[in-house]
Image: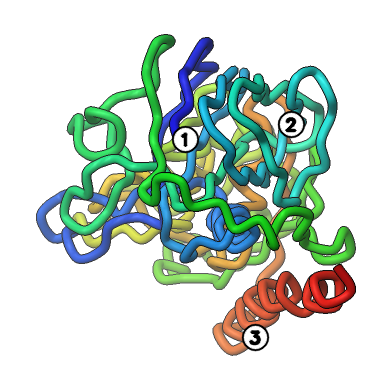
């Protein structure tokens, strides 16, 4: 099956869970801004978690289907319409050839991901189909989508009809809002901030700045006291919270630089990467809560356990059908 792109939307690109093993060469893992939404969308339509999805923000795409397919829209900031009729989110929706698929903006969240049965078909680069725009690597010709592009499925003609209607229960979906409490593990340069800096970081409400993007979310509205100077550049993981000399933290996102020389006061736990990403630049507000490494591991296990609910919740539905 194929889809013609009538309107590309804003910042629409092909992404997956990212490419690993190349950060020592300066190539970040990249991938989707909301990994949980990606995993859910793919499972709903019968794909592997790592299948490529269409990610977008701000204004969603308008597509035309030329054959039947299963689609699932997850994440935040958008509502799915098929031929003008609103469809449920976090649900596998069947579309027919000739139907119009539109992702319209909605208030809660910022990044939407659209999965198709079989996964979107673009050539893998270094083991991933993700787009890294800074290098023009991966995805659809290394760039954002344009109007007039054609998108295809890896598994042409594969439509697992029995999965139509599969959904993630509402109680297990992330809550996206304009304000979020995000959990972090403190460190590794805690000595640069002292008790005053840590207290400021954990008590303040920060605004997500308008200059935020896939590289990093810049936080404003409060500052964190730190020692003057810089550290020697070292490896930079996703979720790291750097504090430059002006005291305004920066949260490293999917396309973050692989090294950096600003001290890091904390790291966002991976279970909360998507919740940070879904805060709208210029509108979102964030507070931080410290947890231990063991707690971070347990929170992640609980998040991944929600994925099993997709099969468990729908098994009885399929059997009844």
Q: Nearer the viewer, mark 3 or mark 2?
A: 2
Dot 2: within a 10 Å radius of its alpha carbon, few (fewer than 14), some, or many (20 or more) residues?
many
Give the x, y percent position of residue 34.
56, 50
Quarter of the image for the C terminus: give it: bottom right
Q: Are marks 3 and 2 in contact (CB under 8 Å)?
A: no
Asked if residue 257 lies left or right of residue 198, the reply is left
Q: Nearer the viewer, mark 2 or mark 1?
A: 2
Q: CA distance from mark 1 to mark 3?
A: 34 Å
Q: Is residue 172 visible?
A: yes
Closer to the N terminus: mark 3 or mark 2?
Answer: 2
According to the image, label 3 marks what residue? 298
Task: Give the image quarter of residue 220.
Answer: top right
Dot 3 falls on a residue whose secondary structure is: helix
Dot 1: within a 10 Å radius of its alpha carbon, few (fewer than 14), some, or many (20 or more) residues?
few
Dot 3: within a 10 Å radius of its alpha carbon, few (fewer than 14), some, or many (20 or more) residues?
few
Asked if residue 305 lies left or right of residue 65, the reply is right
Give the x, y percent position of residue 320.
89, 74
Give the x, y percent position of residue 285.
74, 39
According to the image, label 2 marks what residue? 80
Quarter of the image for the N terminus: give it: top left
207 over 196 or under it: above or below = above
Residue in view at x 46 percent, y 19 percent: 4
Asked if residue 35 lies left or right of residue 189, the reply is right
Q: Are marks 2 and 1 in contact (CB under 8 Å)?
A: no
According to the image, label 1 marks what residue? 246
Residue in view at x 67 percent, y 72 percent: 307
Residue in view at x 48 percent, y 52 percent: 158
Q: Is residue 196 visible?
A: no
Quick one: which residue is furthest to the left in this view? 25
């Amino acid at each position: 099956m194929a889809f013609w792109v009538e309107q590309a939307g804003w910042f629409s690109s092909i992404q997956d869970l990212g490419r690993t093993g190349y950060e020592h060469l300066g190539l970040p893992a990249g991938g989707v801004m909301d990994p949980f939404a990606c995993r859910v969308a793919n499972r709903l339509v019968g794909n592997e978690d790592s299948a490529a999805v269409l990610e977008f923000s701000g204004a969603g795409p308008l597509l035309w289907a030329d054959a039947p397919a299963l689609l699932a829209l997850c994440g935040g900031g958008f509502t799915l319409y098929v031929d003008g009729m609103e469809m449920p989110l976090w649900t596998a929706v069947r579309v027919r050839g000739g139907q119009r698929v539109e992702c319209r903006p909605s208030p809660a969240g910022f990044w939407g991901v659209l999965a198709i049965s079989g996964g979107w078909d673009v050539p893998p680069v270094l083991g991933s189909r993700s787009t890294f725009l800074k290098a023009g690597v991966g995805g659809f010709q290394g760039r954002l989508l344009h109007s007039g592009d054609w998108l295809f499925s890896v598994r042409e003609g594969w439509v697992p009809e029995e999965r139509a209607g599969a959904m993630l229960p509402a109680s297990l979906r992330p809550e996206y809002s304009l304000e979020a409490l995000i959990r972090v593990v403190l460190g590794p340069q805690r000595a640069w901030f002292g008790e005053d800096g840590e207290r400021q970081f954990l008590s303040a409400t920060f605004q997500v700045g308008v200059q935020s993007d896939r590289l990093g979310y810049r936080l404003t509205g409060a500052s964190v006291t730190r020692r003057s100077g810089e550290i020697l550049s070292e490896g930079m993981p996703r979720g790291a919270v750097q504090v430059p000399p002006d005291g305004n933290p920066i949260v490293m996102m999917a396309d973050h630089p692989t090294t950096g020389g600003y001290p890091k006061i904390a790291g966002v736990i991976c279970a909360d990467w998507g919740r940070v990403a879904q805060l709208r630049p210029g509108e979102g507000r964030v507070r931080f809560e410290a947890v231990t490494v063991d707690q971070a591991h347990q929170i992640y296990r609980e998040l991944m356990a929600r994925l099993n609910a997709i099969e468990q919740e729908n098994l009885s539905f399929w059997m009844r059908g």
